Image (cartoon, rainbow, N blue to C red):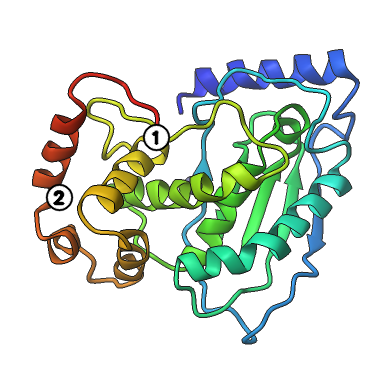
Amino acid sequence: MEGKQILTIAAVFVLGAVTSGWCQGPPIEILQTRSDAPAPGGSSTSGSSGGITDPVGAESSSTVDARVTATSPEDLVRRAKRLYRKYGPVIQKALDAATLPEIQIKVTYDPKAYPGVTDGNVVTLSYPWFCSHKDDGAIIHEFAHVLQGRMRYDDETSWLVEGLADCIRAAIEPSLELRSSGFHPEFQPGGAKLGYQTTAHFLTWLGKKIRPGGVKALTRALRSTSYTHDEFTKYYGKTLEVLVRGYEKSFGAKSVKA
Ligand SMILES: [Zn+2]
């Protein structure tokens, strides 16, 4: 996300806050609250993921709605905790995580902050964002990062980590109360390895056309320091490059919703 874009979006946040009367918190302050989510299995195996920041996805335009996620920072924390209690075990199972760790929810008032940032078991949510966006799916995406655990997150793997997190989001999104109308895993030429929704679309296609279960298998592999893209060959029987070419070919140049 370019700085200029962030500033533009931040301006939308501020405008939304002023016009709606929501988001009247202090300019910059951190509210820190311990989650009361249960932590079966004791301490977490999930370590620091290096601070995964999530820029605005498809819903880059402001979608102000009367049914907003957050009417106060405390409400946002409570809402996130409720979502974790409800969907944490679902995500744990989907990602084959050994434990369901206790998480810490922080809220930032910084209008320039990303909607969500996850560092280990600490999830920081942007109050300005969730004031003006129906976007429980973004919170689910961050919970997926928590339950992915410690995994490689660098130039080679970040697209895959984000795409896998958006697979989880896409699976849960339909059952969320505050769904983002702008969120759809979708085909984009050249987008299979761009991360987020376009990678989620690619991974979904692999599950339907080649072999199901790849989300869990790739997640397990990414938790290993020895991960390479050869994991695609091991699981799907073809190299990542061949799989991407087949995916692109199957859709041609047409944009198709998942
Ligand atoms: Zn992410």
Q: Note whether ligand 1 is within 8 Å of mark 2.
A: no
State the residue in front, 69 or 23.
69
Q: In which quarter of the image is residue 151?
A: bottom left
Q: Dot 2 lies on which element?
A: helix
> Residue 3, image x and y in percent?
50, 23
State the residue in front, 226 or 167.
167
> What residue would you read off at disc 1?
258
Amino acid under disc 1: Ala
Pointer 1 local density, CA inside 10 Å: few below 14, some 14–19, many at least 20? some
Q: Can residue 31 be seen in this view?
A: no
Q: In which quarter of the image is residue 193?
A: top left
Judge from the rendering whether residue 178 lies leftward or rightward of residue 54; answer left or right. Answer: right
Amino acid under disc 2: Leu
71 up-or-down from 124: above or below: above
49 up-or-down from 57: above or below: below
The quarter of the picture where the C terminus appears is: top left
Q: Residue furthest front?
A: 208
Which of the marked residues, 2 or 1, is nearer the chain's N terminus? 2
140 up-or-down from 101: above or below: above
Judge from the rendering whether residue 232 lies leftward or rightward of residue 49; answer left or right. Answer: left
Residue 240, numbered label: 2
Query: Which circle, 2 or 1, is nearer the viewer?
Result: 1
State the residue in front, 7 or 66.
66
Q: Which residue is drawn at 38% across and 31% down?
A: 186
Q: Dot 1 lies on which element?
A: loop
State the residue in front, 167 or 208.
208
Q: Residue at x 62, y 86 (%)?
A: 41
Q: Which residue is drawn at 26% across and 19% down?
A: 254
Q: Which residue is drawn at 12% across and 39% down?
A: 246
> Residue 183, image x and y in percent?
53, 31
